[in-house]
Amino acid sequence: MTECNRQPLLFSSLGRKKIVADFTGGTLTSDAGGLLLREVDRRLGLIDGLAECLTDPRDPAKIRHDLRTLLAQRIFGLALGYEDLNDHNRLRHDPLFAVLAERGPLTPLASSPTLCRFENRIDRRSLLRMSCVPVETFIRSHAVPPKELVLDFDPTDDAVHGKQEGRFFHGYYDHYCFLPLYVFCGDQLLVSYLRPSNIDPALHAWAILKLLVTRFRQAWPGVRIIVRGDSGFCRWKMMRWCERHGVHYVLGISRNPVLERMSEGFMALAEEAFLATGTKQRNFHEVAYAAQTWDRERRVIVKAERLPEGRNLRCVVTNLTDRDPRQVYDGLYIARGDMENRIKEQQLGLFADRTSCHAFLANQFRLLLSSAAYVLIEHLRRTVLADTELAGAQVSTIRLKLFKVAARVVVSVRRVVLRLSSAYPLQTLFRTLVQRLVPATGPPSLAC
């Protein structure tokens, strides 16, 4: 115990009673709910799967922290709200973190310099293998083969503030950034791929789609696959590949003078109805359209909308033939907007934009670590929390209400006992989750 820890902190008095604090509480943790995530990982085998993708160049005789321990320390740290490597200079002594990393509760974990070296020695081949793990986890999550998969593709900006490799200025976002590409199926994350920002937003999307389609059809030969994306993915070669391989697509398409002329009659009908009623009008139609660079005409859905603020024309291109225009747009396309909430969870809740390493590969590794943390929490939300008050909660809410639980850690020869805070308000829910995650073995004794 350092002298700094013993230095008293004086607060305002409570009546005649002085309020004094210090950091000599001993083996306590503020993250006891992390045990729920440990049980989720034991179900999924996620961290074990990621660890198998890595190679360790270190001398085995001199290793104190194996790769799995380092991965667990970083992934659980991100899930519990600790984005900075410097946080681990203290967290490495937290007995709960040691348990999460499958180490003895009184065993110190890795320091921030060790974790920094771990991130910066990652190689491209390991990253490629790691990127397959979320896809395999997704496949294993389906007990019954799905009939249909809707894959959402979307890029986002990841602002950088240093001289990182691959940084470029992006005119649309008006700052220096990376341009990572995400692929989700519903709330489940499939791909998180870091890219520089001086590129076409659709760069490599076609190749990633091909890999995903191939793997899903190996697992589920009869599955129907639909690709959704904004106008950044409206590339005729990608659409032609989908058509040739039985993949359906619904993609945004930017307005242009030709589409505006073709849609003028539809907009006139909406305008007339608006002037007659004074309320918003929305009509759905379709046209056969081909841009000059396309190989042929394709089905374009037109939403002709008249709002009090003015006209609003939106178009999407699709090869779906079994749905009418309204079903394509309202029933399918606009649902892709929910993917932006998942990306926000990644960046705001799990620090996927903490790409402050100099090396580009190290930043891709950090993105995958944040993605792994998301996979754990999303599995908890989708399966264990499905019928509870937190079924639709964001990552930050789940962390605050379930993971941030104070506990005193008591260690003996045969057991580790966490005595959770008696004032914790969600005790009933917490007990229910543990019962769902851990097979029943009879009530344990808490005596040490």
Image: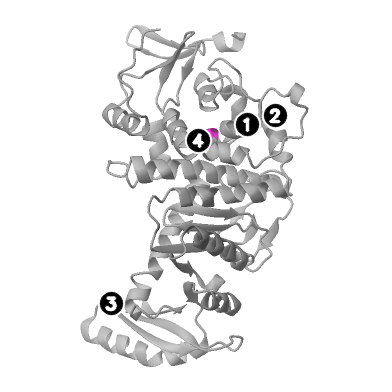
Q: Secondary structure at mark 3?
A: loop
Mark 1: amino acid: Leu
Q: With respect to residue 341, does 55 lie above or below?
A: above
Lower position in the chain sequence, tag 1 or tag 4: 1
Q: Nearer the viewer, residue 364 or 135?
A: 135
Mark 4: amino acid: Gly
Position in image of residue 244 (x %, y %): 54, 78
**Disc 4, disc 2: CB below 8 Å?**
no
Distance from the alpha carbon under mark 4 to that under mark 2: 20 Å
Report which residue position mark 3 lands on.
280
**Numbered mark located on residue 79 in the image:** none
**Disc 2, disc 1: CB below 8 Å?**
yes
> 371 left or right of 392?
right
**Numbered mark located on residue 114 in the image:** 2
**Numbered mark located on residue 70 in the image:** 1
Lower position in the chain sequence, tag 4 or tag 2: 4
**Which quarter of the rendering shows the C terminus?**
top left
Q: Nearer the viewer, residue 342 or 256?
A: 342
Mark 3: amino acid: Lys
Farthest left residue?
Answer: 277
Lower position in the chain sequence, tag 2 or tag 3: 2
Mark 1, Cα crowd under 10 Å, few <14 / some 14-19 / many 20+, is: some
Q: Secondary structure at mark 2?
A: helix
Distance from the alpha carbon under mark 4 to that under mark 3: 43 Å
Residue 68 in view of the camera: yes
Distance from the alpha carbon under mark 1 to that under mark 3: 56 Å
Give the residue drawn at x 33%, y 47%: 392
Lower position in the chain sequence, tag 1 or tag 3: 1
Query: Which numbered mark, 2 or 3, is in the foreground of this view?
Result: 2
Distance from the alpha carbon under mark 2 to that under mark 3: 59 Å
Provide the residue span drawn in magenta. 76-80
Mark 4, Cα crowd under 10 Å, few <14 / some 14-19 / many 20+, is: some
